[in-house]
Image: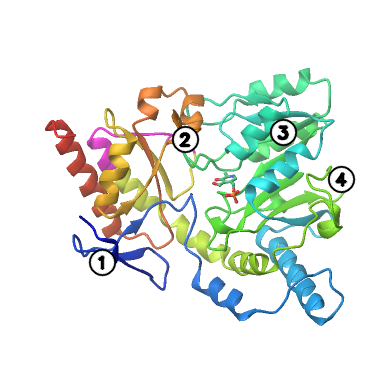
């Protein structure tokens, strides 16, 4: 039995993982759930701490207010730099979360016909459902069906708003955004793209893609929760979700979360460094996946371009709960390929959209590595996987 009193948590300076010391095992606890959220980068934590306890309301005209305003404007500049945003064509609106920014984009244009891909994050998919949006199917590799998109666009009676994520949070599958954006623009529509998972893992450039709207979120790149941004083409005037003050040009009223935005800005300044480290993980992931495949694992989305840190793996016949508990006891944090809503566990909508059976989907876990992954981490994961396979095939699972 692990007693809570015996658990010590502390950051490693390079934020690779937390170390958990218990009576049972003296090995570091590996955090392989970086697509869910990330460690706060110590440089971000220091920068936020340096702000101290000063009252920071950018609407105030006194010196504290002016300081707060300056922090917000510096952060806007940081978003522009991190994403190569052409300054005169786009504006940056801060929000509290990627979820909020996605909702701002989707509900901001009620006169447009809405189309979203079947594998979007729930913050897009459910917003689209509640707004009568149409779902664009994906193929078995998780890639949006471009022919279907073309048909939907040509049949649309109203100007289309299409929302497709750059990279999927479960599979890591990367969409052909350039092609999607060109097709929608050719039909006179506008495109929103959710770049929450892509940022800090692969290059994201507004200048190169020219989407009409793009969402990013702070806590996925080593920043604090409570900050996100919607980058949007300057000529667009979305209806606000909230009404109140004139903050963020009235598009997102409410006193700004200046401390979180400041932390977000510092995390953005480090995003490139994070991306370079993440890109180097592809070979470690490849080595892990080939070893697991030999043990009977199925990897989803592996025929498509994927984020370098993400692997979505089925261990046939073994429920995701058994797997998560097993890995947790082996000192490794992974997450489920399923969602829990109203107390009911359902198979991942992403896998179902890719034609994966419910049974297989409920035997799937997601592994998402952080920038400091080592060969040793991979070895431990593969050993733990093997141990579970052996236990289950021996009838103990
Ligand atoms: N979009 C994607 C692809 C995500 O993975 C997430 C979070 O998991 C979100 C949006 C929502 O972001 P937030 O947690 O900041 O609300």
Which segment is the magenta one?
Answer: 290-304
Mark 1 or mark 3, which is nearer the start of the sequence?
1
When asked about the image quadrant of residue 240, the answer is top right
The mark lying in front, picked from 1 and 2, is 1
Task: Please check the rendered image and state whether residue 296 is part of the magenta-colored stretch, yes or no.
Answer: yes
Label 3 within 8 A of ligand 1 by Cβ: no
Q: Which residue is mark 3?
A: 162
Q: Earlier in the sequence, mark 4 or mark 3?
A: 3
- Measure how far apart labels 4 and 3 are at the Cα level: 16 Å
| CA distance separating discs 1 and 2 | 31 Å
Lower sequence index among marks 2 and 3: 3
Q: Which residue is labeled 4 in the image?
A: 237
Q: How far apart are the alpha carbons under marks 4 and 1?
A: 55 Å
Indicate left or right for 305 with 130 as reference: left
Mark sitting on residue 6: 1
Residue position for label 2 = 340
Residue 8 coordinates in the image, percent (x, y): 31, 68
Name the residue rendered at 65%, 67% in the picture: 265
């Amino acid at each position: 039995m692990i007693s809570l009193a015996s658990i010590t948590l502390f950051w490693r300076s390079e934020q690779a993982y937390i170390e958990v010391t218990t009576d049972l095992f003296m090995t570091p606890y590996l955090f392989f759930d970086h697509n869910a959220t990330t460690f706060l980068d110590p440089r971000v934590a220091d920068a936020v701490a340096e702000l101290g306890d000063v009252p920071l309301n950018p609407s105030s005209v006194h010196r504290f207010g002016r300081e707060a305003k300056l922090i917000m404007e510096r952060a806007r500049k940081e978003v522009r730099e991190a994403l190569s945003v052409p300054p005169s064509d786009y504006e940056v609106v801060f929000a509290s979360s990627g979820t909020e920014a996605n909702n701002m984009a989707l509900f901001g244009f009620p006169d447009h016909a809405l189309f979203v891909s079947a594998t979007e994050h729930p913050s897009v998919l459910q917003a689209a459902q509640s707004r009568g949006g149409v779902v664009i199917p994906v193929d078995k590799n998780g890639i949006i069906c471009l022919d279907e998109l073309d048909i939907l666009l040509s049949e649309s009676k109203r100007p289309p708003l299409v929302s497709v994520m750059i990279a999927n949070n479960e599979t890591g599958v990367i969409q052909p955004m350039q092609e999607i954006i060109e097709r929608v623009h050719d039909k006179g529509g506008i495109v929103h793209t959710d770049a929450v998972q892509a940022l800090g893992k692969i290059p994201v450039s507004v200048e190169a893609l020219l989407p009409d709207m793009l969402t990013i979120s702070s806590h996925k790149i080593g920043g604090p929760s409570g900050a996100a941004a919607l980058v949007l083409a300057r000529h667009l005037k979305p209806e606000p979700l909230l009404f109140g003050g004139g903050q963020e040009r009235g598009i997102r009223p409410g006193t700004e979360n200046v401390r979180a935005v400041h932390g977000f800005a510092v995390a953005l300044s480090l995003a490139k460094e994070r991306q370079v480290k993440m890109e180097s993980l592809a070979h470690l992931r490849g080595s892990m996946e080939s070893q697991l495949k030999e043990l009977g694992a199925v990897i989803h989305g592996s025929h498509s371009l994927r984020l370098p840190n993400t692997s979505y793996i089925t261990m046939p016949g073994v429920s995701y709960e058994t797997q998560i508990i097993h890995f947790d006891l082996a000192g490794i944090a992974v997450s489920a390929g399923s969602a829990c809503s109203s107390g009911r566990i359902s198979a991942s909508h992403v896998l179902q959209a890719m034609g994966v059976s419910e049974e297989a989907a409920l035997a799937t876990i997601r592994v998402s590595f952080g920038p400091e992954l080592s060969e040793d981490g991979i070895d431990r994961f593969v050993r733990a996987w093997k141990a579970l396979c052996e236990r289950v095939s021996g009838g103990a699972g």
